[in-house]
Amino acid sequence: MASTSTPASPSAHAADSHDLIRVRGARENNLADVSVDIPKRRLTVFTGVSGSGKSSLVFGTIAAESQRMINETYSAFLQGFMPSLARPDVDVLEGLTTAIIVDQERMGSNARSTVGTATDANAMLRIVFSRLGDPHVGSPQAFSFNVASISGAGAVTFEKGGVTTKERREFSITGGMCPTCEGRGTVNDIDLTQLYDDSKSLAEGALTIPNYTADGWMVRIFTESGFLDPDKPIKKYTKIELHDFLYKEPVKVKMQAINMTYEGLIPKIQKSMLSKDREAMQPHIRAFVDRAVTFTACADCGGTRLNEGARASKIAGINIADACAMQISDLAEWVRGLKEPSVAPLLEALQQTLDSFVEIGLGYLSLDRPAGTLSGGEAQRTKMIRHLSSSLTDITYVFDEPTIGLHPHDIQRMNELLFRLRDKGNTVLVVEHKPETISIADHIVDLGPGAGTEGGQICFEGSFAELRQSDTVTGHHIDDRVSVKSEVRSPTGVMKIRGADTHNLKNVDIDIPLGTLVVVTGVAGSGKSSLIHGSVIPRDGVVSVDQAAIKGSRRSNPATYTGLLEPIRKAFAKANGVKPALFSANSEGACPNCNGAGVIYTDLGVMATVSTPCEVCEGKRFMASVLEYKLGGHDISEVLGMSVAEAEAFFGEGEARTPAAHAILDRLVDVGLGYLRLGQPLPTLSGGERQRLKLATQMADKGDVYVLDEPTTGLHLADVERLLGLLDRLVDSGKSVIVVEHHQAVMAHADWIVDLGPGAGNDGGSIVFEGTPADLVAAKSTLTAQHLAAYVAQED
């Protein structure tokens, strides 16, 4: 129904009255019927403890509905190729504009993806070399490491004037791909002893590769193919059998009336595992690849991925491989020096892209850097580059903690970029915990008061000055400061690192004290990760907790991810004298109507898929007969509905006492996840919750040294104190803890600080300070020292 509104004054236009995004009755995830008005063309920051509902409101409601409505403007044919987005659970959403999400998701899992290919800088650089390179070797694809050189000839048949004619045609494509490594830059050598135990047969479980179980499909295709004897030990294979087992080319075979493709074990592993980016692999797959495969730079192309022809063409003595290997800040200066009128518009566009890298604080990267090796913060800022020069206005930009991975020195630069986007007439929505960014907001929305079921409400709306005076958790902690330790722990030993030269490190020699809390800091790109990943993590006894995302479907939950469900199932089985598999919603105990999902999905074609609770199990996911079995007076669905804190008490004593489950629950409480439900689907967890879930899981690993990569990511100010307590408990239990961190509270709490710099990229890679936090503050000799001194002075 059309409606009209009367302007407030003769000079005001009705179209100018739509200056708010109105949300009414939002109930996505844990939101408790939230209603809020968000000003357009302003910078609005959303705060609150981790799990309070910030992401559910900003990403799950506002951004999701904007994208869904834009998708509906396309034809039904195109929508069939797009992801089907369900409408968020909200009564009213008005005043939406096109939403662009700039999140922390890692950039691609393809080993062929680099910083240059992900930002189109490589595409422009290839055109420049195809026009100006000497000697001329071909079109832009002659400089692409993803295009192979091929040629062929044959007869083609076509009709011309009603007459069928045959002609011989030849074709050739000149690509830039190195034929030896196929454009990957590395070649691999697989250790066969890590793939199988040759004293066993396939039927006895000879294969030691993850997911290759003796009765699984991955192994059955070998045992039932007809090429191999499943009961014969591998060491007794003939040469032909061993070749068929390891290297056979793909062929069609029939298994149980199903057509399948059989191929050798080595090509199968290369396609399924080695073609993916290592950083995107699941932890157990990554561990297998690390021990079974040795990667070395391709001898033919020197790791550049390009063939000889592409490397031979140069501009002013520089070939495209040299250009891509340059630090982007240096490459920007080189491009600025190219004066060629014939490609002037292209050079200008390339120059603008490279300058954006420098401006956003990523000038230390190179275009040949694999995209999968970027941290969450680096990936987010790389995605920002394409928006900085955009002419679009009245867009809603949605950022998920844009200060992640940024040194305090760099946060001011990020704030200026947010201002630039806003001042072009855009709405900027930011989910953030850092006071430095919260303080610049035009409008602040604070959610809480707690997390999970205790959150999901609007606790405060207003300015930063008003937030500081408010009676909210964020208001109480916004000015929190941690004092520098007056006494630090004495080391129990040292970890010696000599001649570290990974990436930009300049032959670093350092002794890292053990038995203490060590913080490694420095501006982004200074060499922190190179030092830790290159010289610390590969050592025996080191447990690494990084920022890699947790992948999981709706069937995955904290209980399955942490391994908690296994002792729970066994406890139920023992108490009731039945099989443990009955207490898995993914196995024998699953409700037959919804297959253990708890919901029924109805596919409506191009319309959004509708999900409704299963009528048979009422969303409990289990068969009715399984729910009759009890442990401590509760059935399995009631246990999965408990919070972590409730379950810790439940499994800690009485009839349900289960030490194995209680130990896991203790760790979850330690990292501040006591409010999570055991059966809560992983996709509904926030980024900070997922990282702490990962931390709790890996705390169980046996190791002497724990390495944590920015554990304050996604943590509210109120939770930082809890994290510091957890780090102290780890050290006091006899562990050594090394933290890569930018948060001043963690620096101040350290026993020892290692500061790298002085700058990023070529300007970094050196140890500029090592000592206690008190000595660092007193010296004020580095950027980190200056910011930590200012932080401590505020506390005083």
Image (tube, helix red, strand yellow):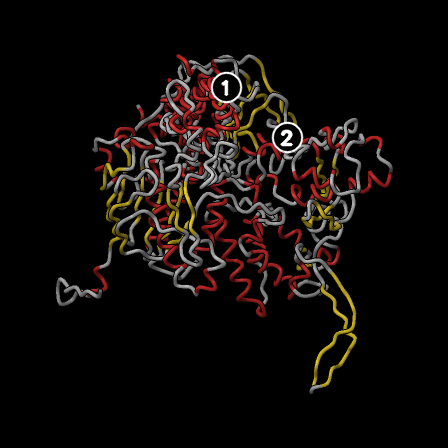
Q: What residue is pinned by disc 2?
A: 500
Where disc 1 sits, the SS reads loop
Three-letter amino acid code at disc 2? Answer: Ala
Q: Where does the image place residue 378, in percent across and percent down from the top left? A: 49, 43
Q: Where does the image place residue 652, in percent across and percent down from the top left? A: 41, 15
Q: Where does the image place residue 85, in percent across and percent down from the top left? A: 41, 52
The residue closer to the viewer here, 27 or 303, is 27
Tell me what residue is drawn at x 24 percent, y 33 percent: 468
Can residue 405 be seen in the rendering of this structure? no
Q: Which numbered disc, 2 or 1, marks the residue that appears first in the sequence?
A: 2
Can residue 234 be seen in the rendering of this structure? yes
Quarter of the image containing the N terminus?
bottom left
Question: On screen, 308 above or below 105?
Answer: below
Where disc 2 sits, the SS reads strand
Q: Where does the image place residue 379, in percent across and percent down from the top left? A: 50, 45
Tell me what residue is drawn at x 51 percent, y 22 percent: 578
Place residue 493 in its image quadrant. top right
Name the residue at the right extreme.
Answer: 239
Tell me what residue is drawn at x 62 percent, y 38 percent: 503
Place residue 198 in its image quadrant. top right
Three-letter amino acid code at disc 1? Answer: Gly
Neighbor class of circle 2 (other Cα within 10 Å; few <14, some 14-19, many 20+) is some
Distance, label 2 to label 1, CA atoms, is 58 Å
Name the residue at the bottom extreme.
Answer: 161
Neighbor class of circle 1 (other Cα within 10 Å; few <14, some 14-19, many 20+) is few
**Apparent side of residue 786 relative to residue 149 in the rendered image (left or right):** left
Tell me what residue is drawn at x 72 percent, y 64 percent: 173
Q: What residue is pinned by disc 1?
A: 577
